[in-house]
Amino acid sequence: MTQPQAVNRQTFDQVILPIFSPAEFIPVKGEGSRVWDQQGKEYIDFAGGIAVLALGHCHPALVSAVREQSEKLWHVSNIFTNEQTLRLAQKLINATFADRAFFVNSGSEANEAAFKLARRYAITQYNPYKTKIIAFKQAFHGRTLFTVSVGGQAKYADGFGPKPADIIHVPFNDLAAVKAVIDENTCAVVLEPIQGEGGITAATMEFMQGVRKLCDENNALLIFDEVQSGMGRTGKLFSYMHYDVVPDILTTAKALGGGFPISAMITTKDIAQTMEVGAHGTTYGGNPLACAVGNAAFDIINTDEVLNGVQQRHDLFVSHLNKLNDKYNIFAEIRGMGLLIGAELKGQLFNRSKDVMQACAVEGLMMLNAGPNVLRFTPSLIISEEEINSGMIKLEAAIGKLLS
Ligand SMILES: *Cc1c(COP(=O)(O)O)cnc(C)c1O
């Protein structure tokens, strides 16, 4: 047997498609909101794997779920169903507006299914010209050609040839702009209740309720992309629950598997039944291993203890950030909901979120951004007070060095 070769950050440039620029260190172990790299250096994790690790690293209940299910049944394909997928569907349905679920493996795939379903519904229930999708500038819905085209960021969507047609983008939180373009040929309006990648911008109450009304008046479906904002991230199971507005289709991913790849699209019975056997599909989606982890994560996240703890942690993060801002005057705005928090940079740090992330790594803190000018905080929903305080000391040290 040949010994495996040592790998390091340079190896990345030699073997991986050059579409990422990962940090200089390589994490090898995690526990809760602490991570260790190849050299044994410790980090506090404020990034949470981009809002995925709702229960931190290696939560014991998720570790047991993987272990137990991995000794029973991993995969059967959708030629057969399985107990874990049925249980997880029941849980999502019982906790939301929905009556039907479809499982896939990523946010993009869940949104792809949502957009195909919306088109199919409009075409079969109304007419073949009802295909217009209204989406928002700065929105992010994934990287398949359809989802990236519905997303509102040209830098991600351009340069890949012809895009799926009949998609229109208007400014977020601008009800008049939606009203100006919505018509009888609109099949769906799709939005993130809190835009994540686009810079942590929450929809206003008036906007959410107004869009719902416009959809109803035009027989268009309302799709909420809760891939980032869902599964407890804002202190409710889904963020739409803060708004008193119910969608027709909702997608969830990231935190759904707590780190194991799984996503879901949920909808009503009436809409679901416009897709017949064979109309859409997936090989891996809904596999027992992923759904076992999803079930374990769901049972912990959807409890008062975890959901109520999110607001307390939000308050602690924001009070630390306000103190930092009082001292250094670096944030133009601190915004977001629950543990989806954005701090918009200004002054000496304007457009320097990448520099802040790098300086944080040196201090032992895993940070995230949302575009060049916003620091993003998406930690574990159960990060401890001590971990928050310790991470904030590191953030301050990093900022102090950048400003000196
Ligand atoms: C991350 C994200 C996606 C894409 O999810 P992938 O798993 O990367 O395909 C889609 N929508 C939103 C709102 C996201 O935050």
Image (cartoon, rainbow, N blue to C red):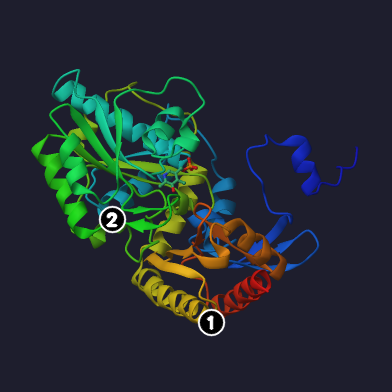
Q: Position of residue 285 (x, y in %)?
A: 45, 36
Q: Residue at x 33, y 49 (%)?
A: 192
Dot 2 beta carbon under 8 Å from ligand 1: no
Q: Position of residue 235 (x, y in %)?
A: 35, 66
Quadrant of the image occupied by residue 184: top left
Give whichever of discs 2 and 1 has the lower sequence position. Answer: 2
Quadrant of the image occupied by residue 123: top left
Q: Quadrant of the N terminus?
A: top right
Q: Is residue 228 left or right of residue 7?
A: left
The residue carrying pointer 1 sits among few (fewer than 14), some (14 to 19) or many (20 or more) residues within 10 Å by Cα, namely few
Q: Which residue in the structure is indicated by mark 1?
A: 327
The residue closer to the viewer here, 382 or 59, is 382
Q: Residue at x 32, y 63 (%)?
A: 236
Residue most toward the top? Answer: 128
Q: Is residue 286 left or right of residue 173?
A: right
Q: Is residue 21 above or below residue 43?
A: above
